[in-house]
Image (cartoon, rainbow, N blue to C red):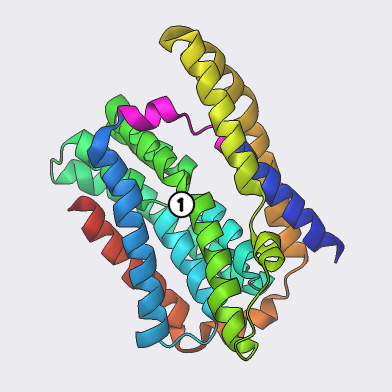
Amino acid sequence: ARPAIQVEYYIKTGLVLLGAEVLFGKVLSIGIPGIFVAWIVTPVVLLTTFWFGQKILKITSKSLNITICADMSVCGVSAAIATAAACKAKKEELTLAIGLSLIFTSIMMVVMPNFIKAVGMDPILGGAWMGGTIDATGAVAAAGAFLGDKALYVAATIKMIQNILIGVVAFCVALYWALKVERDSNSGQKPSAMEIWYRFPKFVIGFLIASIVLSLIYETLGHDYGEAVVTHGVIKGWTTIWRGWFFCLAFVSIGLSTDFRELKSYFKGGKPLILYVCGQSLNLILTLG
């Protein structure tokens, strides 16, 4: 039980620190197309792949299905962790989702920028494409930097906008699980309001507060001072580093509390891998479109 408690603590602290990196001024600066890519395409991919996993692949575990879908469509490990907490997924299911994410992120962060360069795609378009599809924020920045400063800025900003959906997705999943999934398994018994509040991922509140506070400080100081004090000071010098350490500790704790022999049953028929490949392919096509 002890490692599980540590995992929860490390994860939620890391996600609150992530909120400090989401500055609303920069979200608005990317414009309607960027917001459309992050807030319209992402939910479409999430819902489509969840339906695909349930109806076509017939994945037995709904919690495994939704965790993989959130991981692949929203922003990788952070979204997987938050979603797994919201639907009470087993630690083996979370481990599997994270493993798939890390493998494909490693491949995409190398292949995508080289492909974009090879076909002569506009760096801004390429940056937006990578920002909306590569899972991890760090991998997005690394891939964007390969194409230049403009691509890096666009890719990182798209991913930043997408990160806002972590809290929204976690809340919607918690609500759906309480009102639909667990209600069906409990012979139609309606959950109480307190059960829904219990399910509500409290880190979302901290995430929003951190984002609002840092955004207000940035706007008050103005662009130049805001960049120096907030973006390169507080965010680069403090929140990003600590977020990385908290997620690192979370991964170690997950590893210590996971029995990898139990993962065999989840790979039956290769369904999780098929789900990820098909979902990411849809994500790549819709985001580019």
Give left or right: position of 201 versus 228.
Answer: right
Residue at the far right in the pictured view: 2
Relative to residue 163, is residue 269 depicted above or below?
below
Give left or right: position of 278 versus 142.
Answer: left
Where residue 67 sits: x, y (%)?
A: 52, 67
Residue at the far left in the pictured view: 120
Where residue 184 sits: x, y (%)?
A: 57, 86
Main secondary structure found in the magenta portion = helix
Give left or right: position of 213 versus 108.
Answer: right
Who is closer to the viewer here, 144 or 30?
A: 30
Where residue 142 sits: x, y (%)?
A: 41, 38
In what element is the residue under mark 1?
Answer: helix
Q: Quadrant of residue 240?
A: top right
Residue at the (17%, 53%) spot, across then down: 289
Residue 198 visible in image: yes
Residue at the far bottom in the pictured view: 187
Amino acid type assigned to the residue bearing label 1 in the image: Cys
Q: Which residues are magenta?
A: 18-29
Relative to residue 133, is residue 276 depicted above or below?
below
Who is closer to the viewer here, 141 or 55?
A: 55
Q: Quadrant of residue 273?
A: bottom left
Where residue 156 sits: x, y (%)?
A: 39, 36
| Crowd band around label 1 with a 10 angstrom C-alpha radius: few (<14), some (14–19), many (20+) | many
The residue carrying mark 1 is 75
Who is closer to the viewer here, 1 or 179?
A: 179
